[in-house]
Amino acid sequence: MAPENHIPRALRDLEALFGELQVSPIYESEAVGLEGDNFHNLVVGIYTDLSPRALVVELRKLEARHGRRRTPDRFASRTLDIDLLTYGDQIVDDGPIQLPRDEIVKYAFVLLPLSDVAGDELHPHSGRTYSQLWEAFDQPDQYLWRVEDRVR
């Protein structure tokens, strides 16, 4: 899926939309939920006045510009997958928008880069920081490794 092309382009587009970005390292992991290429994951922190719903709309547009085709198969390969993980300390469960996302505490490839960018912020449900959640994360079968900056 050419992450070495899509990730830098997506970061440039996000910067054009939102200004300065807080960007985690990129982590690679084996595909979860599908047979396919390894995942490349990172977390980007932004500041915005958009509502969560309006922000998700903008992120979906960005995915589409990068060739993302949404299909009924939620585990299909994709060029780009941008999820809104948190929105400050808001708790939202409104159709397609769930904040904070459940995946944060389930998957190393979500929690580790989030702890890199927002380690001191509190998870609204647990009251623990993302760094504390990462330190306590106990899923030894979830392997991930840091990708060199060649992908950025």
Image (cartoon, helix red, strand yellow):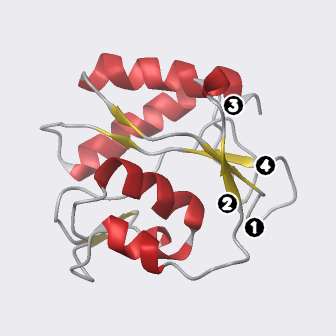
Residue 29 in the image, given as x and y percentages of width and height: 72, 55
- State the CA–CA distance, disc 4 to disc 1: 11 Å
Q: Are marks 1 and 3 in contact (CB under 8 Å)?
A: no
Residue 19 in sight in this render: yes
In front of the other: 98 or 112: 112
Do residues under tags 1 and 2 come within 8 Å of each other at their CB atoms?
Answer: yes
Q: Residue furthest front?
A: 135
Residue at coordinates 50% horizontally, 78% vertically from top-left? 137
Quarter of the figure that contains the N terminus: top right
- Crowding at dot 1, Cα within 10 Å, few <14 / some 14-19 / many 20+, comes out as few
The residue located at (31%, 58%) in the rendering is 119
Q: Quadrant of residue 122?
A: bottom left
Cα distance in 3D space between marks 2 and 3: 19 Å
Mark on residue 38? 4
Image spot of residue 61 (x, y percent): 45, 31
* Residue where numbered disc 1 is placed: 33
Q: Amino acid at mark 4?
A: Asn
Q: Depth check: 128 or 4 in front?
A: 128
* 2 or 3: tag closer to the N-terminus: 3
Disc 1 on helix, strand or loop? Answer: loop
Which residue matches tag 3? 3
Badge 2 is on which residue? 74
Kindly give the residue lying farthest to the right in the view shown: 35
Q: Position of residue 44 (x, y in %)?
A: 39, 40
Q: Amino acid at mark 3?
A: Pro
Q: Earlier in the sequence, mark 4 or mark 1?
A: 1
**Residue at 63% over, 80% down:** 139
